[in-house]
Image: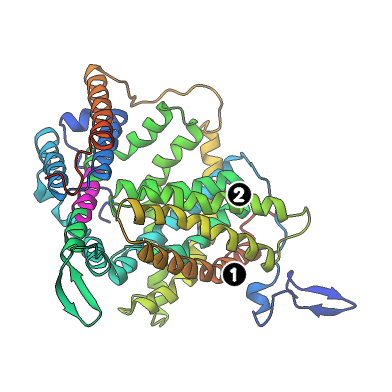
Amino acid sequence: MQSLFLFSGQDSFLHRLDPRPKFLVVLAVLVYVLLVDNPAYMAVAFLVVMAGMWALGSISPARYWTVLVLFLPLILGVTLVQALTYHPAGATNLVAAGPLGLSDAGLVLGLSVGVRLVTMGLTFMMFSMTTAPTKVGLALYKTGVPFRYAYLATFGLRFLPLMQEDLQTLQNARAVRGDPDVGSRNPFRRLKSLPMTFFPLAANALRQSSETAKALELRGYGSPRKRTTVHDLSLGATDYLVTVLALVVLVGVVYASVVLGFGSLGSL
Amino acid sequence: MSEATKTHGGLAEKTAPGPLPESLYGDLPDWNFELWPSSTTVIMAALFLALGFTVNMQITERIDTAMWGGISPLWGIFFFALWNFSGAAFFGLPGALIVANINPIVANLTATNPLAPTFFATNTLYSVPMALWVWYFKRPGQGLTFRQVATAHVLSIPLTLLPLSLIHIYVLHFTMQVVVFWYVAGLVFGYAGLFVAYPFAKKLLEAGVIQR
C-alpha cells in the first residue's frame, strides 16, 4: 500500500532540522498569511516557502504539485462563495444572472483567500515532507508530553495502514456478498454503506487492543521511569538560530500587521 | 430479551423514544465508566477507535471535497460522533482526548486539508464535554438512555462548530450570512449524526468489546 505520509526521506538542511524549531517556522508562516490580506503579499510568502523547500529541503515542486491540486476544489469553492456574496460599495458585477452576480471585489478576496490556503497547505507539506513521522512522537515527548501519550502519535502512524487494510478487507467481503452500496459511484450510497462497515472495524480493533496493551506493558510501556530512546532529538546551534529567527519573524509580522497595517488589501 | 428492555410484571417496556426502534435506540446497557482511567488497555482501545475515526474521515473528506469543495466538513461532522461519542463514553477523558486529537495529527502530517489544524479544537470541543456529560448522567449499575445521550449531543454539537465558524470568519473572510448558513448546515448534519452514533455505541456494548 502506498504511504499516506509525505516524508521524502532525504538528507538536507530541513530534514536535519529538529521538528521543534521547524514547527516555529510553520507557525511564523501561518501567522504571516493569516494577518496579511493582500494577495500579492501572500503570493510572495507562497514563493518563499516553495523556494525554501527547494533550496533547503531539496524538494522541487514536481514532487508535490499533485497534492496542491487537491486543494483546488476548496479554493474554487471559496472564491465562488466570495464572488457571489461579497458586494461592498463600489464593487461591480463581472457576470450577472438575475439576482446573482460575481463581484470583482469578491473575486479578488476569493483569490487572496485561495493563495492563503495554498500557502498554508504548502507550509504543512514542508513540515510533513521533511519530518519523519517517528520524530513527531519524539518531539512531543521532548516538549513535555508524557511518554505514554506522546508515543501514541508514532504508534498510531504505524498502525493506520493496517487499519486501512482491514477496512478494505471488510468492504471487499461485503462486495463479494452482493452489497451494491460498497464502492458505488453514487456518494450517498457509499455513505450509507459506511456505518455497517465501521462497526466490525471498530469491534475487531477493540478486541485487538487488549492484546496490544499486554504486549506493550510487557515492554515497559507504563513504566514511570525516565526512558531513553535509540534515536534522540537534541537541539544544536542551527536549531537555536532557526528558533530565534522564527521568533523574530513572528513578532515582526505581528507588529507590522497590527501596528503598521502592513499587508492589508489596499496596501499595494 | 434485549438488556435495554425493562420488565414490569413480565411485560416488556419500550425504552426507545417515539417510533424509534428498540433494537437501535433502546437504553445503552451498563458499562464500567471512569472519568480518568489510566490503564494501558483503555489507552490502546481509545487509540484504535481514533484510527478508525481517521480512516472514516479520509473517506468523508473526499466526499465533502467533491460535494462542496470541503468548505465545511459536513459529512465529517455527521460521522465524527460515531467515534468521539464512543471514545468519550467508554474511555472517559483520556479516551475523548486521544480519539479527538490523533486524527488531526494524521490529517496535518498528510497535508490533506489546509484547515486541518482546526480539527484539534473541533473534535475536542465535542468529545471532552461528552465525557463530562456521561460522567454526570451515568449511575453505577445503569447504562444511559437515548434522551440523556441526545441531550448531551445536542448541547455539545454547537460547541464543536465554533472553531469552524471562526475559520470561516477570520481565514476565509465569509460574510455573516454565509457563516450562519454553514453553521446551521453543520448543526443539521451534526444532530443527524446522533442517529448513527447511538446505535453504533449500543452495538459495541452488546458485542461485549467494552468492559462491563
Residue type beneath disc 2: Phe
- Res B210 quadrant in image: bottom right
Q: Which mark is residue B199?
A: 1
The chain containing the residue under callout 2 comes to B
Q: Decide whether the magenta segment is chiefly helix, strand or loop.
A: helix
For badge 1, the amino acid type reads Pro
Tell me which corner region of the image, top left, top right, bottom left or bottom right, holds residue A102.
bottom left
The residue range painted magenta reads: A113-123
Q: Left or right of B107: which side holds B184? A: right
Residue lying at the far right in this picture: please name it: B9
Disc 2 crowd, CA 10 A, few/some/many (<14, 14-19, 20+): many
Relative height, residue A169 to residue B88 (above, below)? below
Where does residue B66 sit, x and y in percent of width and height? 28, 70
Q: Residue at x 72, y 60 (%)?
A: B143
Tell if the residue under mark 1 belongs to the same chain as the one under mark 2.
yes
| Chain ID at mark 1 | B
**Residue toward you, B40 or B168:** B168
Residue A117 sits inside the magenta stretch:
yes
Residue B91: mark:
2
Residue at the location (22% across, 50% down)? A116
Q: Where's the N terminus of chain B, which quadrant? A: bottom right
Q: In the rendered structure, are the residues bearing label 1 and label 2 in contact, judged by CB atoms less than 8 Å apart? A: no
Asked if A16 appears above or below A108 in the picture, the reply is above
Mark 1 or mark 2, which has the lower sequence index? 2
Q: Identify which residue is drawn at 44% across, 70% down.
A: A194
Q: Which structural element holds mark 2?
A: helix
Q: Residues within 10 Å of mark 1 (few under 14, many from 20)?
A: many
